[in-house]
Image (cartoon, rainbow, N blue to C red):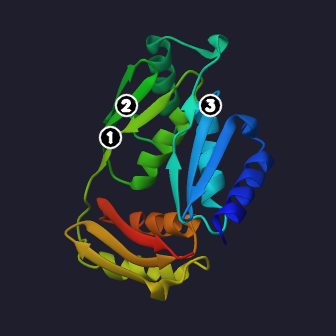
Amino acid sequence: MDDQTLRHAVTEELEWAPHLDASRVTVEVRDGIVRLGGVVGSLAEKHAAERVVWHVRGAAGLVQEIEVRLAPARRHSDEEIAERVQNVLRWDAQIPDARIRIKVEDGLVTLMGALDWQYQREDAEARIRQLEGVLGVANEITVRPGAGAADIAAKVRRALARHAELDADRITVSVDGATVVLAGAVRSLTARRIAENAAWSAPGVSAVDTRLEVAR
């Protein structure tokens, strides 16, 4: 797919997405790398635009430069945002909120602490992105390395092989301590993210180093 065709596909997919105003988002493509610009009214909209690109065939990478500008009625004080963040985390049964510390400054929420699983780290960030008034989320939560991680590589390889969206034989898996290193090629940005999530799902993993290229 050439750059012009890819740009047209991304633009159409943005217009199709119900969760954002595509008229305010700009799209540029160079060598398969999609650059998103423009302005949206919430952090949730910005992330929705990003997810669109992941699912477009031919996109080899993404540069996210969309700016979030809140309407006056949707702006809130840092104190109010902090209170909402604490309430959201407290009521989520999957997230051990007692292990998470938060800081809010000019609408930017920073999450800190240590959790046992990557899905908990991602869920915490996803919940905060949906809150009105939040301009950005800096996720500094770490994942604790688990015990008995000697067979991490074998478990990750089996997880990759189970996914129909992946060509598992094109992905190499190596482990350095509790860090999984993924290398090789995948068919799309979505496949790249699936491979990352599969690696994070193995018990004992504390970090994933992704070196996967998207084959155009």
Q: Position of residue 114 (x, y in %)?
A: 29, 44
Name the residue rendered at 46%, 53% in the picture: 119
Residue labelled with disc 3:
39
Residue hosting label 1: 140
In this picture, is 107 found above or below 197?
above
- The amino acid type found where label 2 is placed reads Thr
Badge 2 density bin: few <14, some 14–19, many ≥20, Cα 10 Å: some
CA–CA distance in space, label 2 to label 1: 7 Å
Instruction: Please report the residue visible at 44 percent of the width from the left and 65 percent of the height from the top.
Output: 196
Q: Nearer the viewer, residue 210 or 40?
A: 40
Mark 1 or 3, closer to the camera? 3
**Looking at the picture, does residue 124 appear above or below residue 3?**
above
User: Mark 2 — residue?
Assistant: 110
Sequence-wise, the earlier of marks 3 and 2 is: 3
- Name the kind of residue labelled 3 in the image: Val
Q: Residues within 10 Å of mark 3 (few under 14, many from 20)?
A: many
Residue 197 in sight: yes
Q: Is residue 90 above or below residue 172?
A: above
The quarter holding residue 37 reads top right
Q: Please, what secondary structure does the residue beneath circle 2 have?
A: strand
Q: Give the CA distance from mark 1 to mark 3.
A: 26 Å
The residue depicted at 40 percent of the width and 63 percent of the height is 200
Asked whether the residues under the numbered discs 2 and 1 touch, taking CB atoms below 8 Å apart as contact, a structural biologist would say: yes
- Three-letter code for the amino acid on which mark 1 is drawn: Glu
**Measured Cα–Cα span from mark 3 to mark 2:** 22 Å
Tag 3 secondary structure:
strand
Q: Quadrant of the C terminus?
A: bottom right
Q: Is residue 202 left or right of residue 150?
A: right
Which of the two discs, 2 and 1, labels the residue nearer the N terminus? 2
Q: Is residue 48 left or right of residue 112?
A: right
Q: Position of residue 57 (x, y in %)?
A: 66, 68
Could you tell me which secondary element the residue under label 1 belongs to?
Answer: loop
